[in-house]
């Protein structure tokens, strides 16, 4: 497996290339996510040793700004969500994806996107907005985010795409009433995908534990599922 680190438009990107001509998964991470990324890659490498794939982990500097789809007052009393997802998506479309497809031995026709928590929400947002991605893995996503249901209800997935959703069984049992809806919203998102004629495959997986349990395995499972549902 080849490993590279590049600065693309001021964003640090870590890239793992397994074989030639495989699909690319774009994964939004935090700036301190190196250890998590290495765990995810090791799991993927063990499960997908005979398949080509590329994983691009892009490290945004401000989690709440860069992955939030629209501005939102503080939910937990200290952090604000300032709605920078559109700028992050523009960077992906105009800088990151062209660089990857011009410089790495990957498939330019098969792009996936995925993430965890707020990055999982961003991945769904980018999947709907850009039309450039063939699949999305939205793991333990922040689907409690106010306004998400109203937004997603009016969206259609790209034609022939696939969607993977997951959530920990304890996540909806939080004391926060605002965030406790995450279980019902994840179920609703899955039903929305099942009704969407553009989605050729969708999955909802329930994991044991809360939001911070087995994060590496949850992410890797979503990415492995995506690669397994790639359409040639």
Image (cartoon, helix red, strand yellow):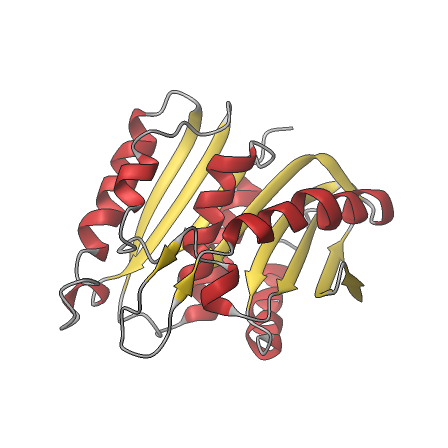
Whether residue 221 sits left or right of residue 144 in the image: it is right
Residue under the point 50% across and 36% down? 129
Task: Relative to 228, say whether 200 is above or below.
Answer: above
Q: Position of residue 154 (x, y in %)?
A: 33, 29
Query: In the image shown, does 214 or 82 lie closer to the viewer?
Result: 82
x and y percent of residue 153 in the render?
Answer: 29, 32
Residue at (43% x, 39% y) in the render: 163
In this view of the protein, which residue sits in the foreground, 205 or 33? Answer: 33
Q: Is residue 163 above or below residue 86?
A: above
Question: For this rendering, which residue is in front, 89 or 18?
Answer: 89
In this rendering, position of residue 81 left or right of residue 187: right
| Residue at point 46%, 52% (across, down) | 122
Residue extending farthest right = 103
Which is nearer the eye, 216 or 100? 100
Residue 34 occupies quadrant:
bottom right
Where is the N terminus found, in terms of image quarters? bottom right
Q: Is residue 140 visible?
A: no
Question: Which residue sits at x=57%, y=75%?
Answer: 33
- Residue 225 against residue 173 in the figure, above or below: above
Query: Vertical placement of 103 versus 202: above or below?
Result: below
> Can the viewer see residue 115 in this picture?
yes
Quadrant of the snapshot with the C terminus: top right
User: Picture quarter containing residue 79?
Assistant: bottom left
Left or right placement of residue 80 versus residue 176 in this view: right
The quarter of the picture where residue 9 lies is bottom right
Q: Position of residue 204 (x, y in %)?
A: 32, 46
């Amino acid at each position: 497996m080849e490993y590279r680190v590049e600065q693309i438009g001021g964003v640090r990107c870590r890239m793992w290339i397994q074989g030639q001509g495989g699909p690319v998964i774009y994964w939004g991470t935090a700036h301190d996510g190196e250890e998590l990324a290495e765990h995810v890659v090791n799991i993927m490498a063990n499960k997908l040793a005979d398949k080509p794939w590329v994983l691009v982990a892009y490290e945004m500097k401000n989690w709440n700004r860069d992955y939030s789809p629209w501005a939102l007052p503080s939910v937990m009393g200290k952090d604000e969500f300032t709605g920078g997802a559109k700028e992050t998506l523009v960077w992906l479309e105009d800088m990151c994806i062209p660089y990857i497809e011009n410089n790495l031995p990957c498939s330019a026709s098969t792009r996936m996107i995925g993430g965890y928590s707020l990055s999982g929400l961003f991945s769904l947002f980018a999947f709907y907005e850009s039309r450039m991605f063939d699949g999305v893995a939205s793991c333990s996503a922040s689907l409690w985010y106010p306004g998400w249901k109203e937004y997603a209800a009016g969206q259609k997935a790209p034609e022939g795409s696939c969607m993977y959703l997951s959530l920990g069984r304890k996540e909806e049992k939080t004391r926060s009433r605002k965030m406790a809806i995450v279980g019902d919203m994840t179920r609703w998102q899955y039903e929305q995908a099942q009704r969407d004629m553009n989605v050729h495959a969708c999955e909802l997986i329930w994991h044991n534990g809360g939001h911070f349990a087995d994060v590496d395995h949850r992410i890797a499972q979503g990415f492995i599922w995506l690669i397994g549902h790639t359409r040639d």
